[in-house]
């Protein structure tokens, strides 16, 4: 059981390091006090869905979907980034990025965080978690889940603190729309290449 816990700790820690960047972006974008809770809720929900999916697939099928197929989730942040950027271009003149995000409904924030969590972490997390849960001692699952939750909670707290830095907030006030577009698209392209999706699709031509 000790080996299972140590493996799980380092596996989750490694995948959470990438997720940290996404959380900073989200906290820097939606930084009203009333918007913090939806981000946290979306982060926990998105991670729970990923772990649940990995547990289900790992336990029932014991088979990892082709990684290039998982990489198609990289299209989600690209689509979100492009949609937000070009829809914002049509907004009324004088309306700032900060004003627009202040008006975002909490339900939409939760959905955005869940989608970004699944898209940004899905390919790597599932590729690691499915074989891990297929071999793990299921008696250790409650401890594993508590450990994952603790690591995620620390990651959320640190990302929130970094996003509160004034220089980070100033950047988003001035270049919020463009920064959001660049980060979302860059994240999506990275996922597509990192999972081998682009290489696989090109090989079919």
Image (spheres, rainbow, N blue to C red):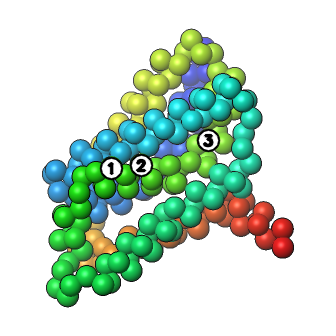
Labelled pair 3, 1 in contact (Cβ < 8 Å): no
Q: Which of marks 3 and 2 is nearer the N terminus?
A: 2
- 139 to 67, vertically: above or below: above
Query: Which label is found at residue 114?
Result: 2
Position of residue 54 measured from the top left corner of the image (x, y, whole percent): 60, 34
> Which is closer to the viewer, label 3 or label 2?
2
Q: Can residue 201 be seen in this view?
A: yes
If the image is split into quadrants, where does the N terminus sit? top right
Q: Tell me: residue 6, above or below residue 12.
A: above
Task: Give the mark toward the camera: 3 or 1.
Answer: 1
- Which quadrant of the view contains residue 85? bottom left
Q: Report if residue 3 is visible in the image.
A: no
Instruction: Work out whether residue 160 or residue 73 is closer to the camera in this orientation and state it.
Output: 73
Tag 1's secondary structure?
helix
Residue 24: image location, x then y, percent: 35, 56
- In the rendered structure, find residue 126 and report the number of the disc placed on it: 3
Residue placed at 73% from the left, 29% from the top?
A: 62
Side of 106 where 199 appears, left or right: right
Q: Is mark 3 on a helix, strand or loop?
A: helix
How many residues crowd around disc 2 within 10 Å: few (fewer than 14), some, or many (20 or more)? many
Question: Where does the image place residue 64, in percent across and percent down from the top left?
Answer: 72, 39
Front residue of this view, candidates 35 and 83? 83
Which residue is painted at 53% across and 34% down in the image?
51
Q: Which residue is drawn at 41% across and 31% down?
A: 149
> Residues at badges 2 and 1 in contact (C-beta under 8 Å)?
yes
Residue pointed to by mark 1: 110
Marks 3 and 2 in Cβ contact (< 8 Å) = no
Q: Describe residue 129's horizontal placement relative to residue 77 as left or right.
A: right
Q: Residues within 10 Å of mark 1 (few under 14, many from 20)?
A: many
Q: Residue at x 72, y 44 (%)?
A: 65
């Amino acid at each position: 059981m000790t080996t299972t816990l140590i493996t799980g700790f380092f596996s989750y820690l490694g995948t959470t390091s990438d997720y940290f960047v996404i959380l900073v972006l989200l906290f820097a974008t939606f930084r009203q006090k009333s918007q913090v809770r939806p981000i946290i809720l979306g982060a926990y929900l998105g991670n729970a869905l990923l772990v649940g999916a990995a547990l289900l697939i790992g336990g029932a099928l014991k088979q990892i979907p082709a990684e290039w197929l998982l990489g198609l989730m990289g299209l989600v942040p690209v689509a979100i980034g492009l949609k937000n950027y070009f829809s914002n271009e049509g907004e009324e003149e004088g309306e700032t990025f900060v004003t627009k995000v202040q008006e975002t409904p909490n339900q939409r924030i939760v959905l955005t965080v869940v989608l970004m969590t699944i898209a940004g972490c899905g390919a790597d997390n599932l590729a690691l978690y499915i074989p891990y849960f297929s071999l793990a001692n299921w008696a250790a699952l409650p401890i594993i889940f508590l450990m994952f939750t603790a690591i995620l909670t620390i990651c959320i707290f640190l990302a929130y603190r970094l996003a509160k830095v004034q220089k980070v907030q100033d950047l988003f006030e001035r270049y919020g729309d463009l920064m959001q577009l660049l980060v979302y698209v860059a994240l999506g392209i990275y996922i597509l290449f990192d999972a081998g999706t682009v290489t696989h699709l090109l090989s079919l031509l």
